[in-house]
Image (cartoon, coloured by chain):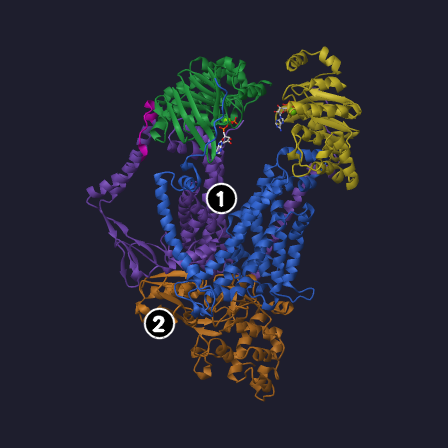
Chain colours: A blue, B green, C yellow, D orange, E purple
Amino acid sequence: MAPHQPLPNQPPPVTQRGVIRWLRANLFSSWINGLVTLVVGYYLLSTLIPLIDWAFIGAVFTGDGVDACRPGKACWIFVEERFGFFMYGFYPEALRWRPTLAFVLFALAVVPPFLPLPARLRRGVAIFGLTGLPVGGYILIAGGVFGLESVDTSQWGGLMLTLILAYVGIIAALPIGVALALGRRSEMPVIRGICVIFIEFWRAVPLITILFMASVMLPLFLPDGVTFDKLLRALIGITLFQAAYMAEVVRGGLQAIPKGQYEAAEALGLGYWRRMRLIILPQALKIVVPGIANTVISLFKDTTLVLIIGLFDLLGAVKSTLSDPAWNNVMAEGYLFVAFCFWVFCFGMSRYSHRVEKQLDTDHRQ
Amino acid sequence: MIQVNDLNKWFGDFHVLNSINLDVQKGERIVICGPSGSGKSTLIRCLNHLEAHQRGQIIIDGVELNEDVKNIEAIRREVGMVFQQFNLFPHLSVLENCLLAPIWVRKTPRREAIEMAMHYLERVRIPEQADKYPGQLSGGQQQRVAIARALCMQPKIMLFDEPTSALDPEMIKEVLDVMVELASSGMTMLCVTHEMGFAKTVADRVIFMDDGQIVEAAPPRDFFTRPEQPRTREFLEQILQH
Amino acid sequence: MIQVNDLNKWFGDFHVLNSINLDVQKGERIVICGPSGSGKSTLIRCLNHLEAHQRGQIIIDGVELNEDVKNIEAIRREVGMVFQQFNLFPHLSVLENCLLAPIWVRKTPRREAIEMAMHYLERVRIPEQADKYPGQLSGGQQQRVAIARALCMQPKIMLFDEPTSALDPEMIKEVLDVMVELASSGMTMLCVTHEMGFAKTVADRVIFMDDGQIVEAAPPRDFFTRPEQPRTREFLEQILQH
Amino acid sequence: ATLQDVQDAGELRCGVSNGLPGFSQPDSSGNWAGIDVDTCRAVAAAVLGDADAVEFIPLTAAERFTALQSGEIDVLSRNTTWTTTRDASLGLNFTGTNYYDGQGFLIKTALGVDSAYDLDGAAVCTQAGTTTELNLADFFRANDMEYEAVVFDTSEASAQGFDNNRCDVLTSDTSQLAALKTQLTDPDSAEILPEIISKEPLGPVVRQGDDEWFNVVKWVLFGQINAEEYGITSENVEEMESSDNPSVQRIVGTSGNMGEILGLDDDFMVDVISQVGNYGEMFERNVGPDTPLGLNRGNNALWTDGGILYAPPFR
Amino acid sequence: MSSDPTPLKPGNPKPWNDPRVRSVAFQLIAIAAVAWIGYSLFQNTISNMESRGIRTGFGFLNETAGFGIIMSLIDYNETMTYARTFLVGLTNTLLVSGLGILFATIVGFIVGIARLSTNWLVAKLALAYIEIFRNVPLLLQIFFWYFAVLGTLPGPRQALDVGGVAFLSNRGIIIPRPVFEAGAGWIGIALIIALIASAVMVTWARRRQAATGRIFPAFPLASALILGLPALAYFVMGRPVGWDIPAMGGFNFSGGITAIPELGALLLALTIYTATFIAEIVRSGIVSVSSGQTEAALALGLPPRRVLRLVVIPQALRVIIPPLTSQYLNLTKNSSLAVAIGYPDLVNVFMGTSLNQTGQAVEIVAMTMAVYLAISLSISLLMNIYNRAVALKER
Ligand SMILES: Nc1ncnc2c1ncn2[C@@H]1O[C@H](COP(=O)(O)OP(=O)(O)OP(=O)(O)O)[C@@H](O)[C@H]1O
Ligand SMILES: Nc1ncnc2c1ncn2[C@@H]1O[C@H](COP(=O)(O)OP(=O)(O)OP(=O)(O)O)[C@@H](O)[C@H]1O
Ligand SMILES: [Mg+2]
Ligand SMILES: [Mg+2]
């Protein structure tokens, strides 16, 4: 037998190449598939084209008042004119640079995971985001000290309020959630029982009943004369609600940590709290980043419910202007605008969490 | 039994199988070896259409393998396959794993199917595990169940894709023993493996593949003692060092 | 250094440790062997209270090991442990793994702790890996880090629970070398292992356990050449076949 | 006691509607306006001397009594109808009436219906937790007619539902109907039916059992009505302090100790009138003929002008 | 063996260093703290309610409610009691959650499978659907469907008419109501017979397969039977069912069965929103069944649909069911947003209007929460039982 001559590799047949391959493989791999493609494609185009026409091509973006708009096409002037109100609610116009500044700081604290910064700086920024920022942000927005004019919480509103609710809800819910999760895994039956009851209760009841209680019934449960800010109460309700969900997520992470890690930490002589802080929680929290992101996103969406208790968050602000006689028939635009804002944030957050996950992962391959 | 003519397959632009020609007689036992990525698994998987080929012909037991669903089903009924990762169904007990094909494909009455399954489980020497679930067995036991499951189809041809490479050394022996016994009973077998001992004892032909092509095909005696191709020699040197 | 008097332990109804008596002198090196499930790991784990015992006494370096948290802390500070599965902390670099105990338990200043950690990492011959993460190391390297981590506590006693059995053959040697060196430096060591070569070279005494009891305890020369108990002989026959 | 609490806090917490033109409505910078809002401002002016020291807490109809009961608010001024049940069993007290209203129907002109007695089978939009809901049931029952109640949680949503044709008729107090009519896509496409099916005295509410506070809220409103009767307005209140009419003197605090016995300053009505105005001014500013609502005084005129507004004397 | 008369006990630690003592002490403190908080809340509430003259107790449940409810599954009118409004709200909540769960499951499964379609367009469309509707608040979606979509339907006079018997307008969907006449009972009997026959047939088919190996097309036959037999009875008995066909009269349609648009909007929103989550759950469940399983099944000669039924679905369900139930719970809780558009669910009717009429917030809110707790706990219970039943046996 002659020595083996390797045959040269050949290019694949045309059906395996380029655009044709892509089309064949993805759209027309069988006649049923082809049919589905055509039908779906037809309906897609026949709904998308009028929609795009309504929202962009025929829409009116600039002008004065409702009269500048065309019937049957979107009227974005409405959003434009009320933009300030949608963003800040009743917050005094002259002072709006303060929340803006707070959110710029916030954005800066969020970016670092993607920058090639030294780990120590990144950690510093993260700690600032969790501690300094809430305090600083509060001072900036609420004022009352350092010569900043005080702005009452009843004037907070719009997207600003939505973001504050979500941000504070998350920051405060995380530690409570961790504590509840640890409690639920405690060996002490009483502690475990208390945590289980707490978690199950908060997970079982609808958020709006909680908000209702927090907003109008709370003084009934407190000693006479003790009362506090309405926004704060909504925040507490949201936080506890969120903490229960967070606890279950964290518990999943704790369960995923192998027993050997606990034992090794114990064998090194570390006490319970150090074991948790140095060994277990850092690993568990990393595992549950996607879970945390999910609860954060749902919390963010749930903040719209404060509308029902009379706070003017983004949806509330938009909804309240819909009854303005000067702006009739802009409901679709208003709701779409709110939907778009929420969508951008939620989608952004889920992408962000994927990035963070990857970032944490590349630190050390297993 | 198996005729492969000018078989060509691409993954995208990558030419995995390049003009493969192969004729397998009834009762023949073929061992396929070759470096990783040479296309051994792909070839085996083409034979029961787990992968589609783009050019060439595969004829099994007189039926041509093409996109015709009826043909594919007919051929799959005649061809048993054992995977490297066993792929047992974890939600079914060992016995139920073995009953699946006889009952739903061959339409055997349940009683008969159970008898047959127990027969094959005895043959792979684990009749006592029949009621356990795959998760409760060791790797070697699992692979033996996988073999029994394939045998329960009463296939004319058995394909093995590295059946021992996911196993611990002790378990490898268990499985190889079963395979040797099977070979001696006259089953047509194609086996991708690097167990050269196995190849020497049972193979009628050893096929060496590289880069998607068959480089050499020879009876084991010739293959191991005087390989014709330098590429084969090189490969054998590496592998026999162990 | 270690005194174990009439130690008894149950898991539920199952009597794992049955009247264990053991005296270990400072600097002594003890190898414990025995069939699987005989309670070797449990005994070792009782010594730094990873498991609580129900009857009997354990006195380590003059301190009695009971439920008293202070005592447990004191004893854990003096006892280093190396696990079969390494149990390194994957989220910390090798160096940080080693710094944990000195900084948080011994309250050593960070600078000193780093110096010491590097010292021990050199001793286990992997100073260059200090900034990597455990996930990036091979099994043998990981186990050496585990040893270094335990050494960084500057313990008086080191416990090893089958430190080499999760390793590939090549890596076993790396780790055994380090352990032999450690033994020759006079560290008090208790080591569960089936590496009989290691036992022969370094052990002062070999303890054979079966069924929760100490069956035989003798210097390695006597143990391997003329075991007194038939049970020991049987075990040795099995194990030395390999 | 509430009076003390309010004075200590320096702020009056007042429950209002979350958007009802003419009664309470915020503009886009958060300034509230309306007759209910002004009622609160008047109380704040009397108690704290500053009509702006009010925190307005928007409430849905369903939340309002719970909020007042729980102490979440100090006074509820949210077009709330005075009824026996509410007065007696909810633990609340009505302090008076700042608007006499009656329930009516708003209907699409296109339907060609001109009497409420022709509404058999109609779908009716209304607001949850209101007397409207109950009167509606009574009215249809009494006249042996069928109806379908489409109940929304805010009045604005019920107007929206009516506008969207979810229902044929919108029912509410006639004053509100006038307000809601202005919010329709085409305000001229609907008209208010002539029938008034109920009495709806709307007024501020306080918690039961705190008579001091009850009196304060009650007499601030009476004071405003009396002020209108005696011609005291925000313009002339300064001059009126030198009036020699004893009735006027008692109102502006230059004689008698009306303030003191209520626990307030004697000139508390001066603060109220100068900052908020008398009842008539309040009415004209928020719901009167020159406002988008364009309501006439009607029943809400003074008794001397043919209305039923009659305040007990300041004495 | 240990026949030692005086066994050595581990020495007793100092009490304050004994973890058992510490643990007991800690738990006692926790109990005390919780008890104290509970007690003071209770005490505050009682004294606050007393000092504010708020009525307490559940006596109000027997009082007449006096308000109408647009939709009720059980008999209701305004002369009935508050207890009745509770039941009306409860059944309406259960109705909308039950239907929502049904529809969301169907849509979710379809979209989840579409996500895995080999057709690029279908897969991307499914992805777009999920990404859009998952990331927008539910409340907003409810408003959107109610005001911006259903609100634009024509009024009852211009109702879209389906064959002259069913009508779609902004008052909802109105369909004919069956009116049973004499002899209609036979149709019911025929249905029962068909059901029993189908059950018998399925059992028989299974037995026969076990005995002879032949596979009997039991499912299509059973469906034919269940549909066919009652139909047969209907005609044989001389069509004993009349239809109350809705007709336009006065303001509205009269007759027929009406599904109000509030229900429609709420259902649409709940379905579309929850289905996005279910779709992702289904997708990950199916993906979690490794391709090796499918390949092994194909290699055994099983035809693709049997592969799905016998191998893929049973394994995927294990992964799908637990997160699926928590979505069901979420849907049930989310149905309380009904209050925003006036669907008369429990929160709207009972915690809304009834609470407002009676002013007994504490009792009413507690009852409402208890309902949700009970639903949640019973679902968790079922879930645990299921999980235990399908847990994979491991070594
Ligand atoms: N689904 C696929 N898509 C693209 N490339 C593939 C796919 N499956 C296999 N390949 C490529 O085809 C080549 C042949 O793969 P194959 O599995 O047949 O090799 P093999 O000879 O079995 O190797 P091994 O001994 O490692 O199993 C490899 O380079 C592999 O990367
Ligand atoms: N947490 C536990 N609960 C119940 N039984 C246990 C537990 N841990 C170990 N056992 C049982 O105790 C016995 C002794 O276990 P141990 O791990 O000490 O054995 P070993 O001698 O180390 O065996 P190996 O060589 O397999 O590691 C075994 O039978 C084991 O099944
Ligand atoms: Mg392969
Ligand atoms: Mg062990």
The mark closer to the camera, 1 or 2, is 1
Q: Which residue is mark 1?
A: E326
Q: Nearer the viewer, residue A300 or B37?
A: B37
Chain letter for mark 1: E
What's the distance in space between the residues labelled 1 and 2, CA to CA? 50 Å
Query: Residue B61 is drawn in which quadrant?
Result: top left
Q: Nearer the viewer, residue E306 or E172?
A: E306
Q: Is E209 within the magenta?
A: yes
- Please provide the residue range marked out in magenta: E207-219
Classify residue E274 as left or right of residue C118. Answer: left
Ligand 4, seen in the image, is in the quarter at top right
Chain letter for mark 2: D
Tell me which secondary structure the magenta stretch mostly adopts: helix
Q: Which mark is residue D193?
A: 2
Percent across and percent down for residue A243 are: 58, 48
Which quarter of the rendering shows the C terminus of chain D? bottom right
Q: Nearer the viewer, residue E56 or E36?
A: E36
Secondary structure of the residue carrying tag 2 is loop
Q: How would you rate the neighbour count of disc 1 (Cα within 10 Å): few for under 14, some for 14-19, many for 20 or more?
A: some
Classify residue E267 as left or right of residue A215. Answer: left
C30 shown above or below E107: above
Q: What amino acid does circle 1 point to?
A: Ser
Which quarter of the rendering shows the N terminus of chain D? bottom right
Secondary structure of the residue carrying tag 1 is helix
Q: Is D270 within the magenta?
A: no
Residue B54 visible in this rendered orientation of the protein? yes
D135 shown above or below C124: below
Residue D60 visible in this rendered orientation of the protein? no
- Is disc 2's CB within 8 Å of ligand 1? no
Q: What amino acid does circle 2 point to?
A: Leu
Q: Which mark is residue B29?
A: none
